[in-house]
């Protein structure tokens, strides 16, 4: 399935707009990751544990987006927007929300 942040697909004709589709993932962090991330804030550097959680959440979000689009007969999702949020008490959860427009296209 083609997934794009653009509103058009070069060389393709969009035949039908099927509606907005969404994929979301909320990943909890744990106390050990928080401790190590705090140390990274003080001494500098990247927080690999948080980056790993964001990567997992993004992959899950895209998988859900594709599954929802496929279930309504789409063969592409255009206009994709990715949002990252910190939620939960004390920012203990990472949320990724991905939305776009499900479409059916054909080759021109």
Image (cartoon, rainbow, N blue to C red):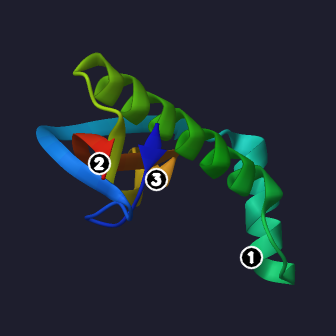
Disc 1: which residue:
41
Residue 16, image quadrant? top left
Disc 3: which residue:
90
Depth check, front residue: 25 or 70:
70
**Which badge, 3 or 1, is on the more N-terminal residue?**
1
Let me know if residue 79 appears in the view.
no
Depth check, front residue: 14 or 22:
14
Marking on residue 62: none
Q: Is residue 18 above or below residue 88?
A: above
Let me know if residue 8 appears in the view.
yes
List x then y, in percent, for residue 14.
21, 49
Disc 2: which residue:
99
**Horizontal arrangement in the rendering, residue 99 relative to residue 39 (left or right):** left
- SS at mark 3 in the image: helix
Cα separation between marks 3 and 2? 26 Å
List x then y, in percent, for residue 36.
82, 57
**Which badge, 3 or 2, is on the more N-terminal residue?**
3
- SS at mark 2 in the image: strand
Depth check, front residue: 69 or 93:
69
- SS at mark 1 in the image: helix
């Amino acid at each position: 399935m083609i997934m794009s942040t653009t509103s058009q697909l070069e060389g393709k004709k969009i035949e039908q707009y099927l509606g907005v589709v969404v994929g979301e993932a909320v990943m909890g962090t744990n106390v050990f990751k928080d401790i190590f991330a705090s140390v990274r804030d003080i001494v500098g550097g990247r927080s690999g544990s948080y980056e790993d959680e964001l990567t997992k959440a993004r992959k899950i979000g895209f998988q859900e987006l594709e599954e929802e689009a496929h279930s309504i007969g789409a063969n592409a999702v255009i206009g994709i927007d990715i949002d990252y949020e910190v939620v939960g008490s004390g920012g203990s959860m990472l949320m990724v929300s991905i939305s776009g427009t499900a479409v059916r296209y054909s080759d021109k």
